[in-house]
Amino acid sequence: MNKQPKYRQVADALRRDIDNDVYKPGSRLPSEADLSARFDASRNTVRSGLALLVSEGLISSSQGLGYEVRKHEVFELNASRFENLTFPQNGDAYSTDVTNAGRHPTQTFRVEVAPATEYVAERLKVERESTTVLRFCHRFVDDVPWSTQATYYPDWLVKEAPRLAEPGDIAEGTTRYLASIGVEQIGYFDEIAARMPTPDEARLLDIGAGVPVLLWTRTGYSADKVIRCTITTFRGDLNRMNYEIGTLSARQEDEPQ
């Protein structure tokens, strides 16, 4: 005898259906009335089971349109190669990587002067509230919101590299631009964390209930100074990262990722 609450039985059965492609990504689930008949359960019980799947990020709900299985077309980012100047690029690293994956990249962009938060100031080794230039990208893959990227540059660097403060994008990418004027990034330190999104993040990334964000902070260094702090916020359900460390001659490129 199944001792689980009825709404969990409903959720478990629908989760199996989704895993087995009975309901494919982008397809709509049967109506609450149809599910009530299938499971011999009240509408409220079915609704509770569906709410559980919404909280897990498996389905989404729309007023008047019912429930839909969420699409999960994952984009894989190789964080070791990202911004590596020895890796061929046509423009910035994001556009290159997405294009090389056979996907279509687009982004909106803004530049502003912003005071350093405690988090950013600690990484840039500057005073809290000191002036930084923020270059902010809202990025899309195949027209779906995928990530935001906020890069903070210290004021002293902007004086040496004035294009950082210009409102337009830097076609060759900021890492290449800085290298061209003698400020070469020779190392970086990465931090990776996950949490639930803020309201602003949920809005920008079109994140449904139950979907976390992946936070990737990369602090870049020249030979003697910290030159930038980049905070990338990914949709947790649509992104995956990998790193290449050491010699990987035994690894075949066509192995499953």
Image: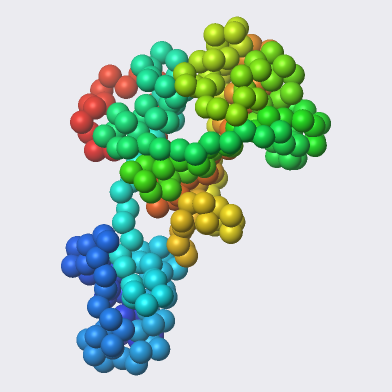
Asked if residue 191 can be seen in this view, the reply is no
* Residue, far front: 167
Residue at 68% from the left image edge and 29% from the top image edge: 133
Q: List x then y, in percent, for residue 256.
A: 24, 38
Residue at screen point 72% across, 30% down? 132
Q: Which quadrant: the C terminus?
A: top left
> Residue 19 location in percent, x, y?
24, 63
The answer to whether one can see residue 84 in this image is yes
Corner quadrant of residue 113: top right
Q: Depth check: 54 or 139 in front?
A: 139
Q: Quadrant of the N terminus?
A: bottom left
Residue 136, horizontal then vertical, whole percent? 58, 36
Depth order, front residue of 242/180: 180
Task: Report the residue at 24% width, 90% height from top.
Answer: 37
**Residue lying at 75% horizontally and 40% vertically, measured from the top left:** 118
Q: Quadrant of residue 127?
A: top right
Left or right: 57, with 119 as reference point: left
